[in-house]
Image (spheres, helix red, strand yellow):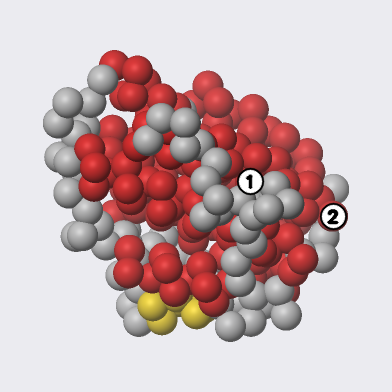
Amino acid sequence: MSNITQKGSDEAEFAKPLYTPIKRRSFFMYAGATAGATALLLSGCDDDDENVTTPTGTVSLGSGDVGVLNYAYALEQLEAAFYAQVIATPYTGISADERMALTAIAKHEAIHRDFFKTAITAAAANQIIPGLNPDFSRVNFSSRDSVLTTARTFEDLGVAAYNGAGSLIKNNDYLLIAGKIVSVEARHAAYIRDLITPGSFSGNDVVNAQGLDQALSVTQVLTAAQPFIKERINGDNVGK
């Protein structure tokens, strides 16, 4: 079982009040496809981690919409693992407000991760990527500056990734969900930025002159995320 998956199991318990309704909505969204897909989804809800194996070498995200979903799933795995570690080993001097907010973000990221796992299992169970192993060796979890700087990187990257992947998604239902998730990620990004520098919630390094968040390609995002993931991620065919 991967490190990310193990942490996720612990997280899922405290996130249960929020996680359950999201999963139910995902059920209604995807159950319309086929009865077989419904059975797979229900199976996935009963035992989240049973089929996850630790990969070695390169992990391909796949192609088409499933590739996009796996792309989002990989990034959400990374974010969920990061915030689970932040909550498990809070940095020196963390305030009660910061801890409460970061715990809420950790719950959101765990829900996002589990949502994608459930959705992909329902849509294409044999194409879902496995649980990934994070590499947080460059993060000093006892340092507020190190943690928040990394959090800002992940949140800005997440927003840019969803924005960039929007044009690759063919299924309108997936596009709608991606649009909802990116709005939450943008709130996280704004909060983290404000913690680092009050009033800097929307910097011109991520928002252009037209007031639009940046959108990055799959290659750009994976290049930035790869140092934090032990497996080599291949996104060459995402959306194709």
Q: Given the current orientation, which residue lies at the most extreme top position?
A: 96
Estimate the x, y position of residue 26 in percent, counting from the top left. 70, 41
Residue at the image position 33 percent from the left and 24 percent from the top: 98
Examine the image and state in which quarter residue 20 appears. Answer: top right
In the image: residue 185, left or right of residue 58: right
The three-letter amino acid code for the residue at tag 1 is Val
Crowding around mark 1 (Cα neighbors within 10 Å: few <14, some 14 to 19, many 20+) is some
Compared across the picture, whether 90 is left or right of 222 comes to left
Q: Nearer the viewer, mark 2 or mark 1?
A: 1
The residue located at (33%, 63%) in the rendering is 228
Residue 148 against residue 73 in the figure, above or below:
above
Q: Which residue is mark 1?
A: 182
Q: Estimate the x, y position of residue 19 in percent, counting from the top left.
A: 55, 31
Secondary structure of the residue carrying numbered label 1: helix
Query: Could you tell me which quadrant the N terminus lies in?
Result: bottom left
Residue drawn at x 41%, y 81% as measured from the top left:
58
Q: Which residue is mark 2?
A: 172
Q: How many marks?
A: 2
